[in-house]
Image: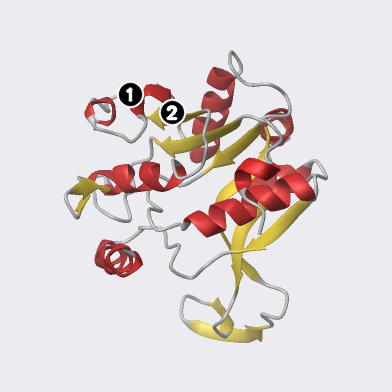
Amino acid sequence: MKTVNQHQKNRNIWAIIPAAGTGSRFSKTELKQYQIIQDQTVLEHTIERLNDLPLTGYVLAIGEQDEYAQTLPLKNKQISHFCLGGAERVNSVLNALNYLEQFAQADDLVFVHDAARPCVTKQCLEDLIQTAIEQNCSAILAIPVRDTLKLVENQRDIHKTVSREQLWQAQTPQISTFATLKKAIETALENDVVITDEASALEHIGEVVQVVMGRSDNIKITYQDDLELARLILQSQQ
């Protein structure tokens, strides 16, 4: 199997990690990306996974009051960059893209990855890059929906069962070229489109976005019990 190095054709690879959110579903007072697993913060684990790739650099979009991120012993800290995040995830990503404009070329590849998704595997990252380069398209990690889905009305009443046949659960990272991603987000914001992830902005401008098979253990820490699950996954992956 060909490696990322053979496939990247000397194109720069950047990572953007939006980390300015408050994560209120996790805790009203504690930030999930700074919880400790195996003597490291969740954010350190996430950065370490991304740095399995030959990154040119990575940008953390952090909150205005965050004085902690820049003190962490992040992997490959010499290629780390920091910028101010925004009110929503999409604003943080755009701020990071605006910051990267001074370094990045139009066709550089840009990953966007959740700060609280520390379990992504190197193989998934390589598959994502390989797809983006070989198919010349944007791409995201995702997995097919496995469970039966119910459309619920009146808070708890089941209205109907929804077919899961063509439904996939989006994950991160999501990858595109610098110019394409920046154009997509700016256009979507100008048109007041609800942007839940980078793919939704890319879809809005008609960009082809290909699904790359991810793994169910690439979880996003959202609730308190997800932290223990992430701890078990990281332990098993070792």
- Is the residue 100 above or below the residue 122 in the image? above
The picture places residue 140, in percent across and down from the top left corner, at: 64, 54
Residue 5 picture quarter: top right
Query: Where does label 2 land, which residue?
Result: 85
Q: Position of residue 120 (x, y in %)?
A: 45, 57
Q: What element carries label 1?
A: loop
The residue at the far top in this view is 102
Identify the residue at horizontal 41%, vertical 53% (top origin).
117
Colour setting: secondary structure
Q: Are marks 1 and 2 in contact (CB under 8 Å)?
A: yes
Question: Which quarter of the rendering shows the N terminus?
Answer: bottom right
Expressed as whole percent of the image width and height from the top left, the position of residue 203 reads: 75, 48
| Residue receiving disc 1 | 64
Residue type, numbered disc 1: Glu
Q: In which quarter of the image is residue 110?
A: top right
Residue at (45%, 37%) from the top-left corner? 18
**Residue 106 seen in render:** yes
